[in-house]
Image: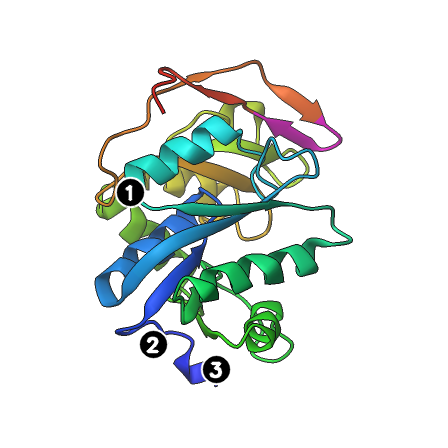
């Protein structure tokens, strides 16, 4: 089963688990090259106002979906009912024709993989086009393809600084992060990003930066749309 995780999307109808960040966006890019993407799924926090993974506001989520020209299925959840809500979204996607769930995971275990178990329950296949790829290769491909992504969350206990918030990922900046012993993809939880433009976006997303927020060892940069036309 595991050796097919990189190829299950070929010539299939796909739904992509989307966070709005760089890895899920690159996975979406690859999915679009090999199959038919029918939509995105995204989990929201309990109040239903922000994404659970990257704390993105609804207006940014809808702007990304609009720029990608894809519908997005969303559900609010606590951590206690996250799995049940995720399964409900998969069932909705399957009813709309989805055959495969695509995710942007890099380092999921071969055995005991949550997405593998959950897709088997939903009677879908799993595709992880970035799985087991070297992290530097992944981020270089993302940047060289022309995607633009901004750092919006940093973990101040893992080598990240307040000054990193709002930075656009470039090859030069990635080198700086590596010099600070930070994973170039942030896979250790060092940072999260929001993608604002790229080769699969119809239009770039213009944002303005809000005031930095703090919670425990994390700092967050809220983003708002420059235009509310979405």
The region drawn magenta spans: 215-220
What is the secondary structure assignment of the residue under circle 3?
Answer: helix
In which quadrant of the rendered view does residue 194 lie? top left
Residue that appears at 70% across and 39% down: 46
Q: Is residue 106 magenta?
A: no
Q: Label 1: state its secondary structure.
A: loop
Q: Is residue 183 above or below residue 102?
A: above
Residue at numbered disc 1: 69
Q: In the rendered structure, which disc, 2 or 3, sits on the residue that comes first in sequence? A: 3
Residue drawn at point x = 40 percent, y = 66 percent: 98
Q: Quadrant of residue 155?
A: top right
Q: Looking at the rendered structure, which numbered label has been put on residue 2? A: 3
Q: CA distance from mark 1 to mark 3?
A: 31 Å
Q: Nearer the viewer, mark 1 or mark 3?
A: 1
Does residue 80 lie above or below 200 as drawn? below
Residue designated by label 2: 7
Mark 1 Cα-neighbour bin, 10 Å: few <14, some 14–19, many ≥20: few
In this rendering, would 54 be left or right of 139? Answer: right
Residue displayed at 33% across by 36% down: 66
Where residue 225 appears, x then y in whole percent?
A: 41, 19
Estimate the spatial distance between the alpha carbons at disc 1 and disc 2, rounded to whole Å.
24 Å
Name the image quarter holding the C terminus.
Answer: top left
What residue do we see at 22% from left, 62% from top? Answer: 33
Please, is residue 54 above or below residue 228 in the view? Answer: below
Mark 1 or 2: the one toward you: 1
Q: Tell me if 67 is positioned left or right of 88 in this view.
A: left
């Amino acid at each position: 089963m595991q050796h097919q995780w990189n190829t299950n999307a070929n010539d299939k109808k796909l739904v992509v688990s989307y966070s709005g960040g760089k890895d899920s966006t690159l996975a979406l890019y690859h999915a679009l090259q090999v199959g038919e993407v029918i939509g995105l799924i995204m989990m929201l926090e309990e109040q239903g106002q922000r994404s659970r993974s990257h704390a993105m506001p609804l207006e940014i989520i809808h702007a990304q979906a609009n720029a990608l020209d894809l519908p997005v299925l969303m559900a609010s959840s606590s951590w206690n009912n996250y799995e049940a809500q995720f399964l409900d979204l998969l069932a909705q996607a399957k009813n709309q024709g989805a055959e495969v769930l695509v995710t942007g995971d890099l380092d999921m275990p071969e055995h005991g993989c949550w997405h593998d178990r959950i897709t088997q329950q939903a009677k879908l296949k799993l595709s992880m086009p970035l799985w087991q790829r070297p992290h530097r290769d992944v981020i270089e491909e993302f940047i060289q393809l022309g995607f633009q992504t901004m750092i919006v969350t940093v973990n101040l206990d893992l080598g990240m600084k307040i000054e990193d918030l709002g930075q656009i990922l470039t090859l030069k900046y990635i080198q700086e992060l590596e010099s600070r012993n930070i994973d170039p993809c942030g896979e250790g939880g060092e940072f999260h990003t929001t993608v604002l433009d790229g080769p699969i976006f119809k239009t770039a997303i213009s944002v303005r930066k809000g005031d930095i927020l703090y919670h425990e060892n994390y700092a967050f940069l809220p983003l708002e749309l420059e235009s509310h036309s979405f």
